[in-house]
């Protein structure tokens, strides 16, 4: 009878279990890291979209010499939030351009967005906040916000962090200069 040499024998069950455990642990860490990167990308693209919409509204106000506002409302189903630009010509108000809906899982951090809590632009309905640009490109702000230029911003983050009183780990802040109306983004 022939003996099988040690070099040709397979792996033991313990060795296989150790390797499978290491692979499972590495996979779990990779999935966590991927989810973090994916949420960062969603926040960044949403913040860029909102900033672009505010820049477009300011440019329309300057070029058309009319008041233009960006409204933040709930969508038709009551889910999420939708940004839309509206232009004013006399007493007529019309929507301009496309609507921007926040993706699932991304939200406005209401406690960290004094710009949306500004009472200077009341509109009909409690689910609407507005940011209005005057014909000269300046934002129309309450006296409270106009006197505190470091408070003219809104914060976008993950929906799970939207009601926090402190800045979440991952967010983007969009600021509007109260004197010129220029829009900038800040990402920690």
Image (cartoon, rainbow, N blue to C red):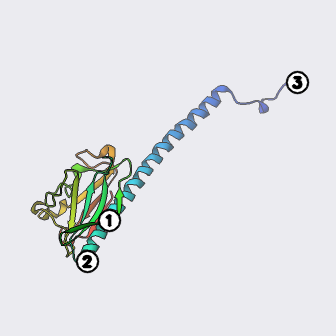
Q: Residues within 10 Å of mark 2 (few under 14, many from 20)?
A: some
Mark 3 sits on what residue? Answer: 2
Identify the residue at the far front of this view.
Answer: 92
- Looking at the picture, how far across and down is residue 144, in whole percent? 10, 60
For marks 3 and 2, the one nearer the N-term is: 3
Foreground residue among 28 and 70? 70
Disc 1 versus disc 2: distance between alpha carbons?
A: 16 Å
Which of the two discs, 3 and 1, sits closer to the camera? 1
Q: Residues within 10 Å of mark 1 (few under 14, many from 20)?
A: many
For marks 1 and 2, the one nearer the N-term is: 1
Mark 1 sits on what residue? Answer: 53
- Looking at the picture, how far across and down is residue 37, in whole percent? 44, 51
Foreground residue among 26 and 160? 160
SS for dot 1: helix
Disc 3 versus disc 2: distance between alpha carbons?
A: 94 Å
Q: In the image, what residue occupies the spot 18% across and 72% down?
A: 90
Where is the C terminus found, in terms of image quarters? bottom left
For marks 3 and 1, the one nearer the N-term is: 3
Q: Residues within 10 Å of mark 3 (few under 14, many from 20)?
A: few
Which of the two discs, 3 and 2, sits closer to the camera? 2
Mark 2 sits on what residue? Answer: 64
Disc 3 versus disc 1: distance between alpha carbons?
A: 79 Å
185 sits left or right of 138 in the view: right
SS for dot 3: loop
- Looking at the picture, how far across and down is residue 38, in whole percent? 44, 51
Foreground residue among 56 and 122? 122
Identify the residue at the far right of this view.
Answer: 1
């Amino acid at each position: 009878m022939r003996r099988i040499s040690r070099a040709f024998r397979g792996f033991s069950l313990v060795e296989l279990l150790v390797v499978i455990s290491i692979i499972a642990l590495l996979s779990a860490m990779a999935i966590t890291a991927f989810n973090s990167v994916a949420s960062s990308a969603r926040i960044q693209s949403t913040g860029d979209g909102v900033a672009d919409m505010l820049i477009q509204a300011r440019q329309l106000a300057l070029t058309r010499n009319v008041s233009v506002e960006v409204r933040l409302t709930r969508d038709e189903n009551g889910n999420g939030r939708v940004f839309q630009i509206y232009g004013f010509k006399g007493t007529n108000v019309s929507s301009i351009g496309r609507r921007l809906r926040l993706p699932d899982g991304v939200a406005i951090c209401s406690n960290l967005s004094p710009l949306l809590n500004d009472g200077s632009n009341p509109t009909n309905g409690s689910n609407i906040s507005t940011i209005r640009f005057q014909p000269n490109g300046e934002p129309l702000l309450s006296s409270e916000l106009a006197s505190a230029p470091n408070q003219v911003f809104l914060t976008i983050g993950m929906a799970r962090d939207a009601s926090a009183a402190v800045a979440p780990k991952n967010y983007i802040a969009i600021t509007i200069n109260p004197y010129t109306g220029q829009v900038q983004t800040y990402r920690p």
